[in-house]
Image (cartoon, rainbow, N blue to C red):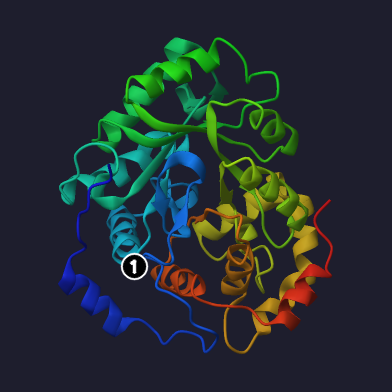
Amino acid sequence: MVARILPNPQDRERRRRDAPERPKLTHQNDISGADAKRALGRTGLKASPLGFGCSAYWAKPAFPERRALALLEQAIDGGIELFDTGPIYGAGLGEQRLGQVLRARGGVGGGTGGLVICGKVGTHVGEGGRVFRDWSAEAVRTSVRRTLDRLGIDRLDGLHLHGPNIHELRSPLLETLEDLKAEGLAGFIGVNSFDPEVVRLGLTIPLFDSFMVEYNLIHKANAVLLQEISAAGRAAIVGSPIAQALFRRAFWPTSPKGAWELGRALVRHRDDFRAARAYRFLNQLPDLTGAQAALAYVLKSPHVASAVFATTSSAHLRANIAAASLTLSDELIQRIDGLPDAR
């Protein structure tokens, strides 16, 4: 049962007055409205088509906490209901920051304030910031308990395995996850993987109700994977829906955040970085930003349950929320469809 905590009406009215005019494209619904909510597969839950990722630079100690918390408040007041986090983000700082906002809004237990809170398990941060994987029953249980403590809740709505390989989706891990669900510590269990073969194996395992996968302008081929997930009655939650905005006009680092983003793109997303050059025309669209076009492109799929993005900008957050109510022209969709994916 999902409880409801209403946003602060005065804050919502003030943000509505200060918000820029939405781009003049086809308007459909507000993302918090009943008609805009999308079913999370067979879980029985519904949520906004957009999710906020408590991750990336937002979860870094270098990003001021005051601004991080303000963005969470803005996201909730803007109608975003799904929040994704995990212990690897800022070595738990992402979870702590989300927990502060949940506590401030009087949240107790999973489904806090009508929100859907999703956590991750399997990746850990050790001494010196070393990231490692541990799927043992003790490590998984300890990780979930620490996540709940940081969040200040007694139950996660969703728990995703974070980046398992194809050989790790087996016993005794599956039994541990089943026990966590039976004990009421997690509402549904899923897999976060950008490897299609891992996802397809997961679809054969009844335990998994949700899959967090990559789908965006430069990974359009994964539309087939979304269809398979949806056809199986599971929830397809999209990660990286804006493709890190690798198509932006300039990537020259003018701030610590910019340097971090450029380094990540060159180390982890070099092929994506090259492919995104063909999409720089999106920055010249007259009525919307490139990021809005990228997000609206993803959300047009009926197989997407929610698209999770991270941001450190209040203006970008407003623009992304506006993008959920936009319909792209047929001409723009055809142009995007005709461009190549990353290799």
Q: Quadrant of residue 75?
A: bottom left
x, y percentage for residue 116?
36, 46
Circle 1 sits on which residue? 78
Q: Is residue 150 left or right of residue 336?
A: left
Q: Residues within 10 Å of mark 1 (few under 14, many from 20)?
A: many
Q: Residue at x 35, y 39 (%)?
A: 95
Q: Quadrant of residue 268?
A: top right
x, y percentage for residue 256?
50, 56
Q: Is residue 211 left or right of residue 199?
A: left
x, y percentage for residue 86?
44, 36
Say if 43 sits above or below 292 in the image. Answer: above
Q: Residue at x 50, y 13 (%)?
A: 175
Say if 183 sits above or below 278 in the image. Answer: above
Q: Is residue 276 visible?
A: yes
Q: Residue at x 18, y 51 (%)?
A: 105
Disc 1 is placed on an element classified as loop
- 161 or 30, which lies in front? 30
Q: Is residue 135 visible?
A: no
Q: Quadrant of residue 20?
A: bottom left
Q: How many marks?
A: 1
x, y percentage for residue 100?
23, 45
Q: Residue at x 26, y 45 (%)?
A: 112
Say if 40 sits above or below 67 in the image. Answer: above
Which residue type does callout 1 highlight?
Gly
Quadrant assignment for the N terminus: top left
- 99 or 202, which lies in front? 202
